[in-house]
Image (cartoon, grey):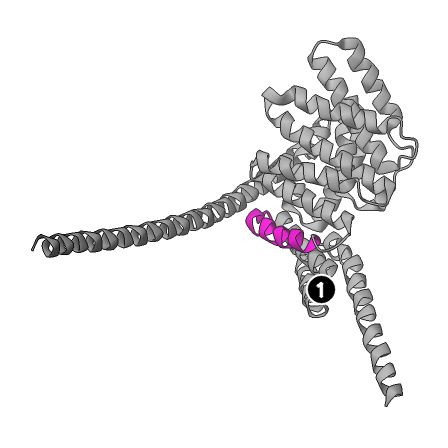
Amino acid sequence: MKFYYILFLSFSLHFPSQTFNDIEKKIKGSPRLISEGKKDEFIQVMNEVIQSSSKIGYPYGVASGYYGKAYICYINRDFTNSINFAKISERENLAIEYSKLKTDNYHLLAQNYAELELNKEALIYYRKMIISSKTIPDKIKSIYNENTAYNDIASIYQLNKKNEDSSYYYMLKIYNNLNGYHQRDEKLDILLAKATVAIAMFNKLKGKKDSAEYYMNKSVAQLPEKFEEDTKVAYLFKHLTSVYVSQGQFNKAKKYIDLYTENSERTKILGDIRNAYKLNSEVSEKIGSNKQAFEYLKQYVTVNDSVHKIDKNNINKAFKKNFQKKNKKIKERNSLFKTFINYYCFNYSFIELWWLFSKEKFSK
């Protein structure tokens, strides 16, 4: 009997371990589905991950599943549901020590709020992302995530013309962090070059010609000599395009905007497709391909209209949901106030009656 108990115990201990491994394999294999544009299949995998992880009490699996669902909602421009799923992932992340997932989730929440132009909330989560990124064990990933946050914060400030100095401050922060770091990979090289170009453009705007020229020349040397073109990371192609355009190297820019366009069309991410068509139109015009520039411009207008319709619908839904929540709170407050008034009136009436009764009784 003792033998069977030990056998059962060893099996029960081994079984969850196997389940954890299976869940992690599903999570690691799932990004391939996004790169192939198979968003529905990806959601199905995330639902399976959440269900399996919930059964065995595996917070990392649950957090990963909800993060995945939040990401799909984000690329579908359903920002309200993306925030809701990411908030669930955030709560699950409190129970685990997996800082990369926490950092990714903070980044996603920040991006959602930025898309909704809720910049105050976006900046809160970008700052959380910076703190979390510093706990990532992998040094390269830690540095990359921290400086990605600085880049995105700079972009938010850049959109507001009154905050250009703040944008410059964060781009300079990236430059100071990465310029002396000699273990940079291609992603860090591109991020550094992008920041350096931004510093050059800022100096040019301020009339500092020598500084602008110095930083622009620095950016040329910072770009990686070799770049894996099958990396399928769309934003790297986009960053490279913007750097080469700023440097006036339009033929090189065209190479990477074509890769960005191809990647965006494959993944079916509307925001990326819109950006790719617009940028490809501009670059094509620069190299004299006017017919191609016109075709991309037409495609951009069509996709941009679709994006505006989706955003308008989602923002209206978000507003309606927010209004319903506020309306519910107002009704609850009113109900509480009515209860208080009724209670007060009842007590007041009771005291009045008691006083009159007592007065009449003692006057006899």
Query: Which quadrant of the figure has residue 247?
Result: top right
- Residue 82 magenta-highlighted: yes
Q: On screen, 212 above or below 44?
A: above
Q: Which residue is painted at 35% across and 52% down in the image?
A: 336
Residue drawn at (67%, 50%) of the image? 268
Total numbered labels: 1
Judged left or right of residue 349, residue 105 is: right
Give the residues in magenta. Answer: 76-93
In the rendering, at what x and y percent does residue 174 appear? 78, 28
Query: Which is the main secondary structure of the residues drawn in magenta?
Result: helix
Q: Quadrant of the C terminus?
A: bottom left
Q: What kind of residue is marked 1?
A: Val
The residue indicated by pointer 1 is 49
Viewer-proximal residue, 210 or 3? 3
- Name the one closer to the observer, 207 or 293: 207
**Quarter of the figure with the N terminus:** bottom right
Mark 1 neighbour class, 10 Å CA radius: few under 14, some 14 to 19, many 20 or more: many
Q: Position of residue 334 (x, y in %)?
A: 33, 49
Task: Judge whether residue 355 can be spotted in this image.
Answer: yes
Give the vertical position of 360 relative to 193 (above or below): below
Extreme-left residue of the structure: 364
Foreground: 153 or 266? 153
The verdict on residue 364 being magenta is no
Q: Is residue 295 visible?
A: no
Locate residue 83, reporting x and y percent.
Answer: 59, 49
